[in-house]
């Protein structure tokens, strides 16, 4: 089958096309998905660079977003059938024509949601949605600070927090992203991290913080987190008892709920560029920085 492989960890040259990748064989609780679209996520870039570890032997097929059609089902699969339009976030192996996916990760794609939009939702947006609804469990009337609101995690988190009834939502971003963010949520208050210190912008503090950056940002965030507040970081932990280090625990049912919100316009997923799936386009997309919206590759 056709796929993009990593022949080693490192720069863009380690990505290469192959027509001879082995088509996966499914286990009893898996389905085989024929890919229609996949997205470029920051995790994919970091993994290729070796920043997420180098323990997995190469060559390997990277990628973490699946969006396609079921063409085979395992003997113990329930609720999914051949022909279903499905999406999932997998750990690796999605940069290929066919992907084996465990049923627990799978979500059905609503009829009015495109494969491209579904692919753009499964990793970053699912992470932001999980952080708001599960890890932080944001409640009505709470004030919320979401770092990196212009990214896929942050933008989904802003919208999910609004749906949860958050009283006031702040986000950090560059001033150039303000219009983009306010098109997503007209009431979000944007703090330009390059010119304004958090303590200056939020002298009364906030109840809840989602940290997508870490380092000094995490430390400065603790200065504006209320004494009984909650902070979840996707990047690192801290000794402060108010801090929890978390990560995406991909869940098909939760993803299906999220895609349902996308289908009725309650959460917006923005796509910046779409291109045909191949190694050259993948390399080009992985060089782009500060893009507003997702980068998607299509197999059609």
Image (cartoon, rainbow, N blue to C red):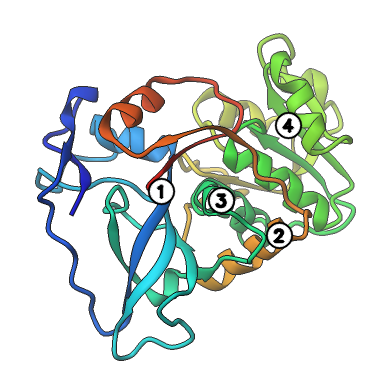
Q: What is the C-alpha distance between the residues marked 2 and 3?
A: 12 Å
Indicate which disc, 1 or 2, sits on the residue closer to the N terminus: 2
Kind of element beneath mark 4: strand
**Marks 1 and 3: CB-CB under 8 Å?**
no
Position above or below: 228 against 196: below
Kind of element beneath mark 1: loop
Identify the residue at horizontal 63%, vertical 57% (top origin). Answer: 113
Please give the residue where the numbered disc 3 appears in the rendered image: 121
Please give the residue where the numbered disc 1 appears in the rendered image: 300
In front: label 4 or label 3: 3
Please give the residue where the numbered disc 2 appears in the rendered image: 263
The percent coordinates of residue 282 (x first, y second) are 34, 31
Identify the residue at horizontal 63%, vertical 55% (top origin). Answer: 129
Residue 87 as seen in the image, left or right of residue 61: right
Indicate which disc, 1 or 3, sits on the residue closer to the N terminus: 3
The foreground one among 195 and 102 is 102
Identify the residue at horizontal 19%, vertical 26% (top origin). Answer: 10
User: On the rendered image, what quadrant is the N terminus found in?
Assistant: bottom left
Indicate which disc, 1 or 4, sits on the residue closer to the N terminus: 4
Q: What is the C-alpha distance between the residues marked 1 and 2?
A: 22 Å
| Residue 250 visible in the displayed image | no
* Farthest front residue in view: 300
In front: label 1 or label 3: 1
The foreground one among 152 and 211 is 152
**Marks 4 and 3: CB-CB under 8 Å?**
no
Please give the residue where the numbered disc 4 appears in the rendered image: 171
The percent coordinates of residue 155 (x first, y second) are 67, 40
The percent coordinates of residue 132 (x first, y second) are 67, 54
């Amino acid at each position: 089958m056709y796929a993009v492989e990593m022949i080693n960890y490192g720069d863009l040259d380690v990505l290469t096309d192959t027509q001879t990748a082995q088509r996966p064989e499914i286990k009893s609780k898996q389905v085989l998905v024929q890919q229609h679209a996949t997205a470029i996520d920051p995790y994919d870039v970091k993994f290729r660079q070796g920043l997420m570890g180098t323990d997995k032997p190469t060559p390997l097929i990277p990628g973490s977003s699946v969006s396609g059609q079921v063409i085979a089902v395992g003997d113990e699969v329930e609720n999914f059938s051949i022909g279903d339009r499905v999406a999932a976030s997998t750990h690796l192996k999605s940069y290929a024509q066919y992907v084996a996916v465990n049923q627990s990760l799978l979500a059905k794609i609503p009829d009015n949601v495109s494969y491209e939009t579904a692919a753009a939702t499964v990793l970053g947006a699912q992470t932001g949605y999980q952080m708001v609804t599960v890890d932080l469990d944001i409640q009505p009337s709470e004030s919320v600070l979401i770092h990196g609101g212009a990214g896929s995690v942050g933008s989904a988190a802003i919208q999910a927090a609004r749906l949860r009834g958050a009283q006031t939502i702040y986000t950090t971003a560059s001033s150039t992203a303000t219009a983009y963010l306010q098109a997503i949520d007209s009431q979000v208050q944007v703090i330009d991290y390059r010119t304004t210190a958090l303590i200056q912008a939020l002298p009364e503090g906030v109840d809840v913080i989602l940290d997508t950056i870490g380092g000094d940002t995490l430390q400065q965030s603790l200065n504006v987190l209320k004494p009984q507040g909650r902070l979840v970081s996707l990047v690192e932990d801290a000794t402060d008892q108010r801090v929890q280090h978390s990560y995406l625990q991909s869940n098909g049912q939760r993803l299906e709920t999220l895609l349902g919100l996308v289908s009725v316009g309650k959460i917006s997923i923005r796509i910046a560029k779409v291109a045909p799936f191949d190694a050259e386009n993948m390399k080009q997309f992985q060089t782009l920085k500060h893009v507003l919206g997702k980068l998607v590759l299509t197999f059609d």
